């Protein structure tokens, strides 16, 4: 295991299938989904389906992103005394800059908006926004290691919030034939969500431990026409395995950001054939986006919330877990986690 392991001590989720981590994880475990019609139509004149988060008020844009993030963060911090919050850095993961239809002002205004919704809560000065999309959670975990083991922070709060349900984003995705429609089976259902995890140094108690992190770049990204060989994802997984001090066959389940596109399923399969050296009777592939939709940066902590719930409730095939995610621009990340006692 890494010399700087992290423990996931609390989780929070706000999704289309549940407004709390227990509700959302139960729905994901059961394979439940709740797609609804948007106000937009595709090129064939059919309504575009989505996984929208049902809130009491009809919010949109940056206001809704902040509200969802605040809800997930509040759930995550429920067991932390409020006087301790100023010592905890808040790392806020959002959509990457180049994405079409991305809300303006995410780096400059969203962090303060979330704090204001939490009754003007103050967090540590190291708090920042991480605009890395689906790979943002791994970047945040790497920073969390530094804050906890070098800066002596008692814990780090990682929150992600994202939505693909804007006219500009849907129009661009539909033009690229990336949405799941009656005419296109090679696509995903767009969604929105917020997710949060609170990490700290592990104790002797049973918990989900982040044992390894890996990062790489895929030269044949989905935006390019080069042949896909899963080089980037394979390198990220190898790095994470080395960090955790284990091999691929030591793991029991894969939890990924796969949301429906054949490219990413093919990449995951190629990486597995490259790295699995011993035959396994079972190596499940879980993809929460099947239930909550393509939710961008919010999928990262959501995967860890699912991993934590599956370990704590003992429905995971085993304690060893591989989580991996990918950005359209080519960034690849892998996380090795293990549930249990020290």
Image (cartoon, rainbow, N blue to C red):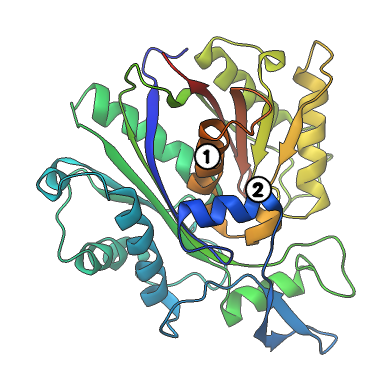
Q: Residues within 10 Å of mark 1 (few under 14, many from 20)?
A: many
The residue beneath circle 1 is: 309
Task: Tell me which label, 2 or 1, sits earlier in the chain.
Answer: 2
Q: Which mark is residue 29?
A: 2
Tags 2 and 1 touching, CB below 8 Å: yes
Q: Nearer the viewer, residue 273 or 159?
A: 159
Look at the picture and state if 240 lies above or below 177.
above
Which secondary structure lies at badge 2? Answer: helix
* Horizontal arrangement in the rendering, residue 103 relative to residue 16 (left or right): left
Question: Marks 2 and 1, how far apart in space?
Answer: 10 Å
Q: Position of residue 242 (x, y in %)?
A: 56, 13
* Horizontal arrangement in the rendering, residue 323 relative to residue 90 (left or right): right
Q: Nearer the viewer, residue 341 or 211?
A: 341
- Residue at image position (79%, 21%) is 274
Look at the picture and state if 44 lies above or below 313.
below
- Residue at image position (36%, 76%) is 63
Where, by quadrant of the figure, is residue 55 drawn? bottom left
Q: Residue furthest front?
A: 313
Q: Position of residue 48 (x, y in %)?
A: 73, 80
Q: Is residue 331 visible?
A: no
Q: Which mark is residue 166?
A: none
* Horizontal arrangement in the rendering, residue 18 relative to residue 220 (left or right): left
- Residue at image position (81%, 10%) is 278
- Quadrant of the drawing holding the C terminus: top left
Look at the picture and state if 87 lies above or below 162.
above
Where, by quadrant of the figure, is residue 68 drawn? bottom left
């Amino acid at each position: 295991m890494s010399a700087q392991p992290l423990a996931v001590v609390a989780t929070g989720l706000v999704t289309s299938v549940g407004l709390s981590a227990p509700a959302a994880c139960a729905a994901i475990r059961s394979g439940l989904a709740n797609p609804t019609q948007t106000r937009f139509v595709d090129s064939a004149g059919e309504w575009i389906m989505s996984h929208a988060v049902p809130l009491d008020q009809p919010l949109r844009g940056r206001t809704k992103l902040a509200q969802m993030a605040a809800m997930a963060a509040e759930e995550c911090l429920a067991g932390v005394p409020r006087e301790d919050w100023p010592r905890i850095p808040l790392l806020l993961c959002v959509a990457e800059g180049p994405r079409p239809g991305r809300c303006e002002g995410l780096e400059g205004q969203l962090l303060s908006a979330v704090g204001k919704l939490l009754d003007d809560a103050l967090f540590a000065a190291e708090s920042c926004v991480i605009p890395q999309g689906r790979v943002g959670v791994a970047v945040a975990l790497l920073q969390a290691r530094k804050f906890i083991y070098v800066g002596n922070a008692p814990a780090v709060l990682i929150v992600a919030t994202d939505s693909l349900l804007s006219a500009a984003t849907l129009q661009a995705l539909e033009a690229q034939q990336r949405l799941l429609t009656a005419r296109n089976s090679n696509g995903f259902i767009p969604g929105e969500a917020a997710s949060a995890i609170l990490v700290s140094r592990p104790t002797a108690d049973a918990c989900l431990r982040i044992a390894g992190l890996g990062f790489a770049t895929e030269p044949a990204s989905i935006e390019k026409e080069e042949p896909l060989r899963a080089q980037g994802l394979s390198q990220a997984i190898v790095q994470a395995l080395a960090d955790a001090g284990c091999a691929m066959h030591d793991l029991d389940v894969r939890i990924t950001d796969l949301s429906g596109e054949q490219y990413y399923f093919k990449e995951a399969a190629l990486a597995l054939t490259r790295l699995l050296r011993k035959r396994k009777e079972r190596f499940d592939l879980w993809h929460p986006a099947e239930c909550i939709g393509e939710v961008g940066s919010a999928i990262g902590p959501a995967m860890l919330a699912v991993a934590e719930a599956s370990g704590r409730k003992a429905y995971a095939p085993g304690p060893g877990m591989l989580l991996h995610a990918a950005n359209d621009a080519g960034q690849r990340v892998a996380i090795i986690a293990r549930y249990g006692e020290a």
